Image (cartoon, helix red, strand yellow):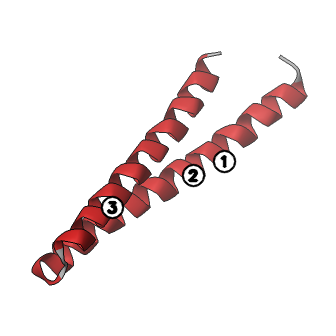
Amino acid sequence: MKATDEVKKVLDDVKDGVNEAAHRGNAEGEKAKRELLGDEMTVGEKAKSVAHQAKETVQAEYDAAKKDLRDKT
């Protein structure tokens, strides 16, 4: 593997790692918000929060999968 390819791989891994961490943090934030506010949230707000948490989790898993796949090749 060329040195430039290796550098690109490392940079892509770092980018995906940062994105994964951000998405996981956002997902945890949504969960914490529901736990903190609890009954103060309407059913609609809770549903929107659950959906946002799920979206962030999927995005985090996607970033992790990209990184894992790149490391295997």
Q: Residue furthest toward the bottom? A: 40
Res. 15 mark? 1
Q: Label 2, label 1: how many angstroms apart (C-alpha)?
A: 6 Å
Label 3 belongs to which residue? 28
Q: Looking at the figure, which quarter contains the N terminus? A: top right
Q: Position of residue 10 (x, y in %)?
A: 72, 37
Residue 4: quarter of image: top right
Residue type at mark 1? Lys
Say if 3 sits above or below 37 in the image.
above
Residue type at mark 2? Asn
Q: Looking at the figure, which quarter contains the C terminus? A: top right
Question: Sequence order check: which comes first, mark 3 or mark 2?
Answer: 2
Residue 11: quarter of image: top right
Q: Residue 13 or 48: which is nearer the viewer?
A: 48
Say if 37 sits above or below 66 in the image.
below
Q: Mark 3: which secondary structure?
A: helix
Question: Sequence order check: which comes first, mark 1 or mark 3?
Answer: 1
